[in-house]
Amino acid sequence: MRGCPWLHVCSFYQKQGPKNLPVSSLHKIKYCLGDFGACARHSLFQELGSQSVPDDLTPDESEKALRLLAKMKPQDTTSCDLPA
Ligand code: SF4
């Protein structure tokens, strides 16, 4: 199966249960198995590593990801080009 390279460690993708449906299922199809480069979590995985991505960050929260990135890696925020 093709998809995001972080599938095996991403808590969002690994989560199961009725509370996470159906929005998370749509996100999984849209981002995890599709355009993972547009995922806010993916960007943080790439920039900060798997230990620094909050469990409650969803793939469509790019602005929140940018704030976290600026807070944790202030010197490199200009090189981050997350989608709007
Ligand atoms: S939520 Fe984002 S980082 Fe996690 S598996 Fe899906 S696309 Fe990858």
Image (cartoon, rainbow, N blue to C red):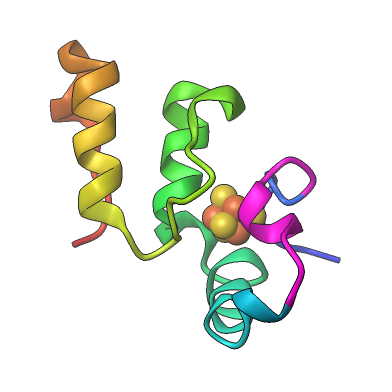
Q: Residue furthest top?
A: 75
Q: Residue furthest right?
A: 1
Toward the viewer: 82 or 8?
Answer: 8
Q: Residue furthest bottom?
A: 22
Q: Quadrant of residue 13 in the image?
A: bottom right
Magenta range is 8-17
> Is the stretch drawn in magenta largely helix, strand or loop?
loop
Counting from the top left corner in percent of width and height, residue 59 is at 44, 61
Looking at the image, is 40 positioned above or below residue 16? above
Counting from the top left corner in percent of width and height, residue 76 is at 21, 18
Residue located at (70% from left, 81% from top): 18
Looking at the image, is 32 positioned above or below residue 65? below
29 horizontally vs 31: left or right:
right
Looking at the image, is 73 positioned above or below residue 1? above
How many labels, in total?
Answer: 0
Q: Is residue 19 magenta?
A: no
Q: Is residue 10 magenta?
A: yes
Counting from the top left corner in percent of width and height, residue 84 is at 18, 62
Residue located at (73% from left, 51% from top): 7
Quarter of the picture containing the N terminus is bottom right
Looking at the image, is 61 positioned above or below residue 53? below
Residue located at (45% from left, 23% from top): 48
13 horizontally vs 74: left or right:
right
Counting from the top left corner in percent of width and height, residue 64 is at 25, 48
